[in-house]
Image: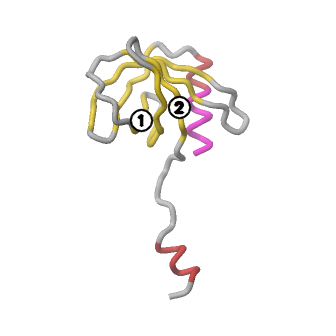
C-alpha cells in the first residue's frame, strides 16, 4: 500500500477541531479539550468528577479571527471521558462567537 492510500484510509474523521478551553466552577478551575460543539452546548473531555447541574464558566481561546470569549452553562450529563454542558443565557455576541467557532471547524 502506498503512502497516499494510507493517508486516505486514516483520514481525519473528526467534524470538530480540538480546542483547549479553561473552565471555572465554584470549586475549581482547570482546562479541558472540546471534542464537540453546537449552538446549544459543548462536550469537554475531562477526568474531573462533575455532578449534573454544576454551573460552569468556559473561556474559549482566540481562534483565527475570533477573540477569546466566555460562556456560562450547566453540566447536563457526565461520562467517563467528559461532560456535556448546556449553554445558558447567551447574549447575541456570545451566540455569534459560538457560530463563528463552529463554522471554522
Q: Dot 1 lies on which element? A: strand
Tell me if label 1 and label 2 are in contact, CB under 8 Å.
yes
| Residue 17 at x, y percent in the picture | 54, 47
Determine which quarter of the picture holds residue 91.
top right
Query: Residue 14: x and y, percent?
Result: 47, 54
User: Given the current orientation, which residue lies at the most extreme bottom position?
Assistant: 1
94 horizontally vs 63: left or right: left
Displayed quadrant of residue 95: top right
- The Cα–Cα distance between marks 1 and 2, rounded to whole angstroms, is 9 Å
Residue 13 lies, with reference to residue 87, above or below; the image says below
Determine the residue positioned at 29% across, 28% down. Answer: 49
- Which of the two residues, 73 or 93, is positioned nearer the viewer here? 73
Q: Looking at the picture, how far across and down is residue 86, in whole percent?
A: 38, 24
Which residue range is magenta in the image? Answer: 97-105
**Residue at the spot x=61%, y=22% of the render?**
69
Magenta stretch secondary structure, dominant: helix
Image quarter for residue 94? top right
Say which element carries label 2. strand
Which residue is painted at 51% across and 78% down in the image? 6
Q: Residues within 10 Å of mark 1 (few under 14, many from 20)?
A: many
Q: Which mark is residue 44?
A: 1
**Residue topped by disc 2:** 21
The location of residue 33, given as percent across then percent down, is 47, 39
Q: Which of pointers 1 and 2 lies earlier in the amino acid sequence?
A: 2
Quadrant, the C terminus: top right
User: Is 4 on the left-hand or right-hand side of 46?
Assistant: right
- Residue 99 belongs to the span the image colors magenta: yes
Is 7 situated above or below 88? below
Nearer to the camera, 81 or 90:
81
Residue 103 drawn in magenta: yes
Amino acid at each position: 500500500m502506498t503512502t497516499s492510500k494510507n493517508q486516505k484510509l486514516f483520514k481525519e474523521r473528526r467534524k470538530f477541531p480540538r480546542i483547549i478551553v479553561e473552565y471555572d466552577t465554584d470549586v475549581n478551575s482547570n482546562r479541558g479539550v472540546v471534542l464537540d460543539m453546537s449552538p446549544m452546548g459543548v462536550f469537554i473531555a475531562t477526568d474531573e468528577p462533575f455532578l449534573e447541574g454544576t454551573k460552569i464558566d468556559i473561556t474559549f481561546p482566540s481562534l483565527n479571527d475570533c477573540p477569546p470569549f466566555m460562556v456560562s452553562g450547566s453540566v447536563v450529563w457526565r461520562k467517563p471521558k467528559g461532560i456535556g454542558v448546556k449553554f445558558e443565557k447567551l447574549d447575541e455576541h456570545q451566540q455569534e462567537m459560538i457560530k463563528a467557532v463552529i463554522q471554522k471547524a
